[in-house]
Amino acid sequence: MFTLHDYMPSQNGWKVRVLLGLLDIPYHSRIVSIFEGESRTEAFLKLNPVGAIPVLELDDGRPIAESNAILTFLAEGTHFLPSDHYLRAKVMQWLFFEQYHVEPVIGSLRFWTLTGRLERNQSMVAGKREAATRAAAAIDRGLTDSLFLVGRELTIADIAVYAYSHRAEDCGFSLKSYPAFVAWSERVRDAIGADYPVYPYSIDPHSDAGATR
Ligand SMILES: N[C@@H](CCC(=O)N[C@@H](CS)C(=O)NCC(=O)O)C(=O)O
């Protein structure tokens, strides 16, 4: 059985949990206490040299890190990753977009906001907020003529981009000016279903959630 090295408040981990669930793949969950340094131990760095979850460990022990690489691995041969050459490249386009324009932007702002780290990162906040606006506008424009990011069906592009972007309001960012984005969020939420909660950082006593520094 696969093992998912995970941290429940992580939306990168959430992406993988969602796809494993939608594909009905049983797995063993191993929680990594990232704020206590468990992702930086020698043993964990052998699984992922960067020292971050999620990591999917295969039955034979081989690890795959980076949430979107894991999604691609799991989705191969399923309707979540089209086999058509062009559509596959379009899925990749959104996966790379997510890692550059969404996760390090909305993901970071949300993390700082929810764990009391905004003030200590103040010098980067204005730039990130501007980048978040650009990302939301890009997602909105990308959805002008289509139900999902790539065609008419949910793909791993939607799961990846939705993971952090639909939580933008957690860091005080209103999505009201992006109607196509909001309508798509509702479609993705309905397609995914209610079995995949977003966990607050406050479930982890080591996260400093609630601090104001
Ligand atoms: N680009 C990576 C980012 C992974 C990442 O930043 N994981 C965070 C949790 S969301 C982590 O494990 N941080 C622990 C650390 O940096 O020590 C992905 O998409 O998987």
Image (cartoon, rainbow, N blue to C red):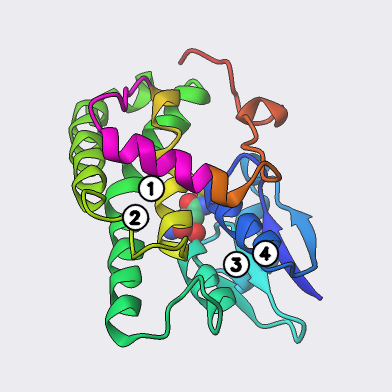
Tag 1's secondary structure?
Answer: helix
| Residue 129 position in % (x across, y down) | 24, 30
The residue wearing badge 4 is: 20
Report the span colored magenta.
172-189
Q: In this view, does 173 lie above or below 188?
A: above
Residue annotated with mark 3? 45
Which comes before the other along the chain, label 2 or label 3?
3
Q: Which of marks 3 and 4 is nearer the N terminus?
A: 4
Q: What element carries label 2?
A: helix
Image vertical order of residue 66 relative to residue 39, above or below: below
Query: Crowding at label 3, few (<14), some or many (≥20) Cα neighbours within 10 Å?
Result: some
Q: What element carries label 4?
A: helix
Q: Is the magenta stretch mostly helix, strand or loop?
A: helix
Q: Answer whether labels 1 and 4 touch (C-beta < 8 Å).
A: no
Quadrant housing the C terminus:
top left
Discs 2, 1 touching: Cβ within 8 Å = yes
Q: Nearer the viewer, mark 2 or mark 3?
A: 2
Q: Which of marks 1 and 4 is in front?
A: 4
Location of mark 1 (residue): 103
Mark 3: secondary structure = helix
**Residue 10 location, x and y as percent?**
57, 44
Dot 1 amino acid type: Glu
* Gap in angstroms between the C-alphas marked 1 and 3: 22 Å
Q: Locate residue 13 relative to residue 112 in the image: left or right.
A: right
Residue identified by numbered label 2: 98
Q: Which amino acid does label 2 sit on?
A: Glu
Tell me where residue 106 sits by quadrant. Answer: top left
Local crowd at mark 4 within 10 Å, few (<14), some, or many (≥20)? some
